[in-house]
Image (cartoon, grey):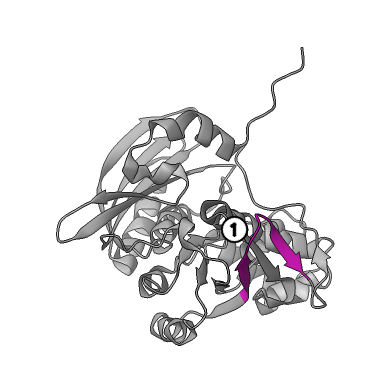
Amino acid sequence: MAAAPHLGEFERIARFFAPLAAPGGLGLVDDVALIDGPDNEQYALTTDTIIEGVDYFPDDPPALVAKKLLRVNLSDLAAKGARPFGYLLTTVLPPERDEAWLEAFTAGLAADQAEYGIALLGGDSSATPGPTTLSALAIGRVAKGKAVLRSGAKAGDFVYVSGTIGDAALGLAALKGELQEIGAAERAFLVDRYHLPRPRVVLGQKLVGVASAMIDVSDGLVGDLKHICAASGLGASIGADNVPLSEASSKILKKLDNGLKRILGGGDDYELLFTSPPGMAPKIAMAVEEAGVTVTCIGAMESGEEVKVKDAEGKPIRIDVAGYSHF
């Protein structure tokens, strides 16, 4: 008898967990759950887990680990246009994560609580022989009915992305020793981008009523655009040359085999990827100015269900790696 086909992460969610979801869970196809709150607002809830040896290196500074844990959750809130409110924290620690480690870890949390206006509300703790497992559930608030979902894109909407793409994926490659010819300054920049996401919390809030659909780039630009396409029942076409790159990534791209695939398919950018109707450019420009973050138009939504990547001449580029999956 042939073995049953292996289910990927999203197939598992759809088959086993989505049938259990309440209406506020949005079918488990979005970044958050939405629950009605006071003052004509909704609470946006999201959770992420990071595991030692999978999502960060065992020797990463505890303060950076804490900030990454909090920021990947804040990025999900940003993608809905929600403002941070509070979070729950679960720590599952092996014996070597002692008081000194916890002191540095909580110092990182305290610094980001002050920066992003969020506070700890509770949580849980447990022990394990390893690896360290850390989880946070972040709560934000957004005006009722105004959260920017993945499902709101329309054919003809333009596709935009904030910041630069591919830095974190190349930073991870540098940490693994895969980029031998990289300069010290470029390496430091890229590694920092991997260690320390910059959740676009202010920009996300400014895009409420402007963006028709939005997601944060956690699993890779092409893969996350596919999520918007699936939720909206559409396809998309983007220009590879339109994708914004940092100076460091641009230098490496010219020397790296499969560099474009790494940049477009790699994850951990935590930039905002969103769609917006034609005519919204002035409002987008205003949001960009108020948030102090660059935004680039990289393509458009269209009928179909594929994400097409094209070169400068309009010829298709095949991207085999199209997003990270845990399974």
- Out of 88 and 47, give the one closest to the viewer: 47
Q: Residue at x 73, y 52 (%)?
A: 321
CA neighbours of label 1 inside 10 A, class few (<14), some (14 to 19), many (20+): many
Residue at x 50% of width, y 60% of height: 216
Can residue 94 be seen at all in this image of the molecule?
A: no
* Residue 297 sits in quarter: bottom right
Q: Main secondary structure of the magenta part?
A: strand
User: Is 136 drawn above or below residue 174 in the view shown?
Assistant: above
Check the picture and name the quadrant holding the N terminus: top right
Q: Residue 132 vs residue 147: left or right?
A: right
Residue 163, can we see it? yes
Residue 169 location, x and y as percent? 66, 59
Residue with the mark numbered 1: 234
Q: Name the residue nearer the viewer: 302 or 124.
A: 302
Q: Magenta segment: does it hold 307?
A: yes
Question: Please, what secondary structure does the residue beneath circle 1 have?
Answer: loop
Image quarter in which the C terminus is found: top right
Magenta range is 298-310
Total marks placed:
1
Q: Nearer the viewer, residue 161 or 90?
A: 161
What amino acid type is highlighted by mark number 1? Leu
From the top left corner, tell me how far across and down residue 126 is, in percent: 36, 31
Describe residue 187's horizontal placement relative to residue 18 as left or right: right
Q: Position of residue 184 (x, y in %)?
A: 70, 72
Percent coordinates x, y for residue 37 in the rendering: 19, 53
Pick whichever, 55 or 314, lies toward us.
314
Side of 4 where 19 appears, left or right: left
Q: Residue furthest top?
A: 1
Up the image or down, 90 lies above or below 222; here it is: above
Which residue is found at the position 59% from the left and 42% from the top?
Answer: 53
